[in-house]
Image: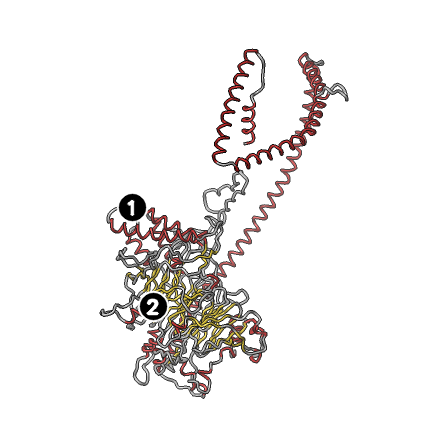
Amino acid sequence: MSGEEDWEELLKDHPVFSFPRSVSGPRGKGEDCLNLSLSSLPDFVDLDPVDDKPTPSGRRQVVAIKDADLIVAAGSEVRITSLGETKGARGSSQKSYKILHTPNIQFEIHQIVLNPNGKLLAVAGAFQVAVIVLPRTGFNKLVTATVDCKSIQIGQYYHAQDTSAPIAKIDWHPWGQGGSTLLVMTVDGKLREYDISSDADEPQQTLSFVSDKKKGSFDAEDAAEREVASFAFGKGRADWGPLTVYATMRSGDIYAICPYMPRNASVPSTYVHALECYVAAKQEFLSNSRRGDSASSDSLTTLYDYQRKYVNALLKQLPPGTAWPATTRLVPMHPPATIKNTPARQGPFLLQPSPRNLAGSEGGDATDIVYLSFGDDAAEESDGETERLGLVLVSFQDGKVDLYLDVEKVEARWETKQQTSNELPMLATYESIDLGIVSTLQNASTSQRGQSLLELVQGNHPVFLNDPIHDDTIYVYHAFGVHVLQLEPLLKGLAIALRDTNDDAKSDAGSLEATLEKVAQTDVLPILLTFSVEQQSSSPVVGVAVPNDVYLTYSIFILTSAMRMSVFPLNLRSETPYAPDPEPSTSQATPAILPAPPTPVPTAGRSDPPKVLPAPPEGPPAYVSLLEKEPFKIPPAIARPTGLPGNPRLSLPNNPNVTKGEFMLTPDTLRYLGTVVEHFSAQIHDVQLAHRAAEVRASLQEQEFKRQRDKCAEMLETARRLGGAGQAQAARIARVQETQRALLARLDRTLQGLMAKASPELSENETKWFEELRRMKAEVVGAGKFDDRSLVARAKLLRREVDRLLPHLKELREKEEARKRNAAESREALGLSQAFELGKRSTEERTRISLMEAEILRLANILDVTLGRPPTAQAQNGEAKDK
């Protein structure tokens, strides 16, 4: 049984996905209120601070996976169940869940977010926020249906009042100390930071993305330009990216605030050193290129001075032992207090060129933003062109996703009396992705009341979800289904374009633009559709989760508002940097030949040159393969690198007519069936072509295998023949060596006979040499056994004397060292005037001793008496030897 069938069967009819009381209870509004239709559209658009309806409006994320536990929010309840036990359960009666008993939470839960360490769960409604302390492992063994958990209401003064602004998004900061820093963004542009470990009522810091209105002034801005839709954290490795917060307005405008650091943060030590090098390089570049406008250079100098002060304040908080290049570790830090100015709001960003609207759409409000950075880990091992490439994605209600390139990184700026620069930051618009929502609603006919189904876009709220394993995969879930955005082709294309531009020294903007036009776009794959053409309604997706646990299958869990769970298994890919592939040969395709043997790498510690096989002779190759040089690529029709199906699965709202056994065939149904059949027919044709190509390839590989097997047999036979000839050669060499040894012995005997005949007696020189050897032996060894004048006996005597005097000398040395230490301590105890007098007298005595030594040496020279070296010279020589 595959993983997909496993989870689909296990989670089907699981009680954890039962409807809350606000829907299925006696006073519930029924399941129809959870579907997006023209009749329920006002409930999706309007927000009532007094009565928060169960309608899944706005941003929704009610599913989370902690290790092997599945957490689901249903109404005001938070349910938790163990996927491990669910997998072991056979019947539906054995499947169970626990309810987290949290009396403080009496509101409809819209969002749940796990903190980085998985111990805290932040829950948010339309206007209120709370944090739940999750139970420890083993909660499922309790007999009771509820588990008592501690819950904390967050910012009651700011988020629990009737006049409170609606909540746009909540998220945990990745650098919060202990994972306790919670950020709450409200639609009025206030981003509040709460530290759960210290104070849950008052925010530690507050950032404002919307400027305050001046009293008595006229403001021509649209309301959508002053309402925040979502926010995201920046990323980077050696810049201001991790200290940047991006926010998007409903109008699509993007703002950023930098620098921002939590009040109690845990920052990697290597990042602080990298940021220091980045700021220093900026200052050095500015000092070397101070030309032209002096006003702009002065403003940059002031800005970089502020940045230098900020970085220096961070460096002072680093503990000892974290100097570069020490191993990185998390260091507790606080925002520097040396700069009193508040960080400036930067924006709105200039989007160049302006993003295009979708065909047939008048545009919609922005709903979410995400920042992606690539090459952070791989860049340490390989220098890729996408090392500092940042991408910004913004989703809109009509299903449009704008993809921007962050070519100009945001830098830290502060509010000053003097405006440092009037230039706005810029994002390069690369493409606008269409999720197909508008075209789907246009193809459907209008409602019975004559209203256009395009009005359903107002209740749509697309949300991004990053894949926890693959950074180049983004999931977008919305009211009409789920789409997967694959950025891998885009990143590889950008890497090739940047490489070609860097290699060509004469390249200009035109060549770069022409190269970028050839770059592949983002792959968009729909995996789940929830819009019913027959019912003209949709079951919005309210939660998506991808587990990152070794004990769970790598899959994606999707929950709709009808509490129906869909699971898709995913495939793991190799983690490789986005380096461009090697360029293919410009010549025509020719049959592949056997590759040359690899050059061996020399082993460390050996200086011998590597032994390389001789190059093959010129001419035709010894073996020609039937296969091409390029490896066989699986056709796209049957290749599923992500493991997701080629056709989206349907998860439609419950149809009451189907339950009654009635089915009505409408023109919309026929058109939909025709479209699906046409799509399936095209896919079947592509699969047939791919099957034929695979069969041809398999047949070719079988023929090549037979040819290689025959060639190997021929090579083995040749090796056997060479081996037989080699044995004969080895026997012949052995006979030659034996004959050579016999000739050498005969030559030695002949030479000795000739020497005996030429000089039978020793010569005079040889006689003197042997006598000298006997004399030296007697001097060294001695004439007899008890000769005490030999060098061996005298050496033994000297060794005994040294062994006898050595302990006494060591004791004297220790006494002298103790005396010197006592003298040094006594000198340290002396006062300044006493030390000066002692030094003066010591100098005088040293002068007198030097004069006396000179007089004694002069008298000894006159009397022709040999004296040893003076004591002062001996002391200086001893000190030199000690050093």
Query: Percent x, y for residue 493?
Result: 37, 57
Q: Quadrant of residue 35?
A: bottom left
Q: Taking 627 as reference, is 878 left or right?
A: right
Q: How many marks?
A: 2
SS of the residue under disc 2: loop
CB within 8 Å, label 2 to label 1: no
Query: Looking at the image, can residue 409 be seen?
Result: no
Q: Quadrant of residue 210?
A: bottom left
Task: From this view, report whether residue 413 is shown above or below residue 850.
Answer: below
Q: Nearer the viewer, mark 2 or mark 1?
A: 2
Residue bearing mark 1: 289
Image point 28% across, 53% down: which residue? 509
Q: Amino acid at mark 1?
A: Ser
Q: Quadrant of the N terminus?
A: bottom right
Judging depth in this view, the residue of 471 and 422 nearest the camera is 422
Tag shown at residue 719? none
- Callout 1 crowding tier (Cα within 10 Å): few <14, some 14–19, many ≥20: few
Q: Amino acid at mark 2?
A: Gly
Q: Quadrant of the C terminus?
A: top right
Q: Taking 381 as reference, is 519 left or right?
A: left
Image point 39% across, 58% down: which residue? 243
Tag shown at residue 189? 2
